[in-house]
Image (cartoon, helix red, strand yellow):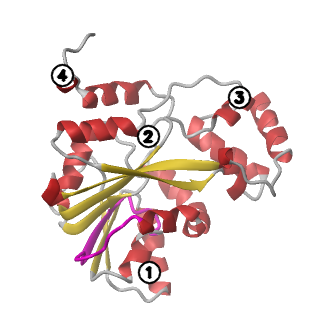
Amino acid sequence: MQYQNFDDIDFNKLYVEQKEKSTFKAKAKESWDKKAPSMNEKVHKSIYNEQFLKLLDLNEINSLLDVGCGVGNLSLRLAAKLSQVYSLDYSPKMLEILEENAKKKNISNIKIINTSWYDPWDEVPKADLVIASRSMEVKDMKEALIKLNDKANKKVVLSYKVGGSFVSNEILEVLKRDIIKKPDYIYLVNILYSMGIRASVNFVQSEGRGTIYSSKEKFIESVSWSIGDLSTNEIKSLENYYNNLDKNKIIDEEFVYWAIISWDKEVQ
């Protein structure tokens, strides 16, 4: 299809089509419930947390809506700086662990909301700042962005995986797998542009698989979580790969990059 100009391109339609084709499929609520305890062991220590928080301007921000909050790695940190935090997730187990974490830290200004992207948000409160950190693997991106924008009094900040894959090229080569990538972050920027929203983009890092898993079993489980069932030969290849990793050497491929996309409501 040929387009006469940029405004003729329906980026959300392209996003939806690419998302449907992608190798990487959405996880059921039960899968996230099962993953919650192991996530709670790692996510609070991630370099990602402080990098994300450094990009937040909390001036005149009193309340937060954390969409896809998980076990609370960001909600808990921000609760100490704000009057009210609303932590939203569709995994009951994630929210249960978040509440346990808050209780241990004597944090009492977090209210949990058990709902999903696809439920009505009529009862979801508005907040000065709305964030959606690593939680936007949705079927229809424009619908999700509208929901975030509608709930924000002042500002929206979200993060989205760079590169279109949850598995590095290096690991894909080990597996000898071809994949169909998911939509990359630039789709979101262009969808926002089509909505009249001029967003800013920054980039942060999180740890790669080779640097955060203490055993090859957990490493292989993580790869399978992202890409699906593994054959016996693929498991053997991953075992060999993990055993030969230099744990003392940090290289770029051992980091994952995230686009931080943000906008202020008053300057749309």
Q: Which residue is drawn at 48% across and 69% down?
A: 73
> Could you tell me if the residues under marks 4 and 1 are in contact, i.e. CB atoms within 8 Å?
no
Label pair 3/2, CB-CB below 8 angstroms = no
The residue identified by callout 4 is 8
Q: Which residue does the image show at 41% across and 33% down from the upper left?
A: 183
The residue that mark 1 highlights is 102
Mark found first going from the N terminus, 3 or 1: 1
Placement of 76 over or under 8, stated as above or below: below
Amino acid type of the residue tagged 3 in the rendering? Glu
Image coords of residue 229 (percent x, y): 63, 34
Residue 236, how many percent across, how many down? 82, 35
Label 1 – label 2 distance at C-alpha: 28 Å
Helix, strand or loop at mark 2: loop
Pointer 2: what residue?
26
Few, some or many C-alpha atoms within 10 Å of disc 1 (few <14, some 14-19, many ≥20)? many
Q: Does the magenta stretch include residue 56?
A: yes
Earlier along the polypeptide chain: callout 4 or callout 3?
A: 4
